[in-house]
Image (tube, rainbow, N blue to C red):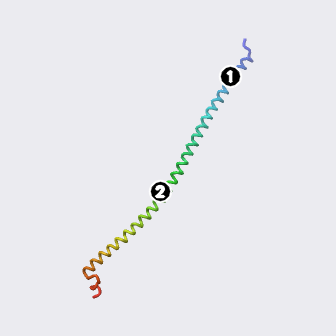
Amino acid sequence: MIDNNYIEYRNDDQKIDDIRRTIDGVKLTMSDNIDRILDRGEQLDVLIDRSNNLNERSFNFQRRARQLRIRLCKQNIIRGCIGCLIILFILYLIIGSACGFDFACAKKH
């Protein structure tokens, strides 16, 4: 005959083994979760570095765009002044050829 104490002892051993297996499963799950968190942390570091790099590039782009805009504006002003001088010179030639270059016809009136 099987002793009741033996059956209870056997059931306790099974319960302990079940608890140990459960604990081992939890340990594996936790270590996997920790590994994932560390991977995410590394990925976040990479994203932060990329973000900082992009921010620096955008600042440089904005600075160069401002410099280019100023330079083009100066060139447009210079071209406008040169165009006005050319028009004035052409008017001088036209009026000078009609009246004389000393503008004698303008002095008569």
Type of amino acid under label 1: Gln
Badge 2 element:
helix
The answer to which quarter of the image holds residue 13 is top right
Residue 97 picture location, percent across and down? 25, 79
- For the point 40% across and 66% down, which residue is it? 75
- For the point 47% across and 56% down, which residue is it? 61
Q: Is residue 44 above or below residue 105?
A: above
Badge 1 element:
helix
- Quadrant housing the C terminus: bottom left
Residue 59 picture location, percent across and down? 50, 57
Mark 1 nearby-residue class (10 Å; few <14, some 14–19, many ≥20):
few
Mark 2 nearby-residue class (10 Å; few <14, some 14–19, many ≥20):
few
Q: What residue is shown with label 2?
A: 61
Residue 39 as seen in the image, left or right of residue 14 = left
Q: Are marks 2 and 1 in contact (CB under 8 Å)?
A: no
Q: What residue is shown with label 1?
A: 14
Q: Residue furthest top?
A: 1
- The one nearer the camera, 33 or 85, is 85
Q: Earlier in the sequence, mark 2 or mark 1?
A: 1
Residue 83 picture location, percent across and down? 34, 71
The answer to which quarter of the image holds residue 70 is bottom left
Residue 32 seen from this side:
yes
- Quadrant housing the N terminus: top right
Foreground disc of the pair 2, 1: 2
- For the point 43% across and 64% down, which residue is it? 71
